[in-house]
Image (cartoon, helix red, strand yellow):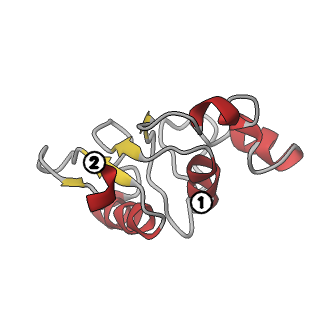
Amino acid sequence: MLDREVEDLIKQNSIYYPFQKICHFLRGIDIVFGNLEGPIVNNPSKFPANSLKFAFSPQAIKRTSWCNFNLFSLANNHTLDMGKEGLEETKEWLKKYGINFVGNPLSGSSYHLNSSFF
């Protein structure tokens, strides 16, 4: 989760704040798998604090790739919080940073794995 209160803490500390204390550990692991709890888009909507929708800026990719996250699940209930377009933009951002992904709430069978992943 990289939105709301966590985003506020990131702004107060550094873009790497959520992972600073565990990055040294994660960098030594071959596969670091995470659940991407929302879409990554250029212009994330600022949903009301009581909303159950989330969206993250592309800065989120920098944070996670810095700590060696190399595989994300898109199969969760917030993947479509910015619609189908948000899902496609998320996939493009992940590909741009060389991050693999699995899962698709639209079909249940989407994946992208770089040849260097295995």
On the image, numbered disc 2 is attached to which residue? 118
Whether residue 40 is visible: yes
* Side (left or right) of 39 relative to 115: right
Q: Quadrant of the N terminus?
A: top right
Q: Residue at x 57, y 68 (%)?
A: 43
Q: Residues within 10 Å of mark 1 (few under 14, many from 20)?
A: some
Residue 105 x/y as whole percent: 21, 45
Q: Residue at x 50, y 33 (%)?
A: 29
Numbered circle sitting on residue 57? 1
Residue 53 x/y as whole percent? 47, 42
Q: For mark 1, give the secondary structure.
A: loop
Comparing 4 with 28, the one in front is: 28
Going by the numbered disc 2, the residue's amino acid type is: Phe
Q: Earlier in the sequence, mark 2 or mark 1?
A: 1
10 Å crowding of disc 2: few (<14), some (14-19), many (20+): few
Do the CB atoms of the residues marked 2 and 1 lie less than 8 Å apart? Answer: no
Q: Position of residue 55 (x, y in %)?
A: 52, 51
Query: What secondary structure is found at the residue carrying circle 2?
Result: loop
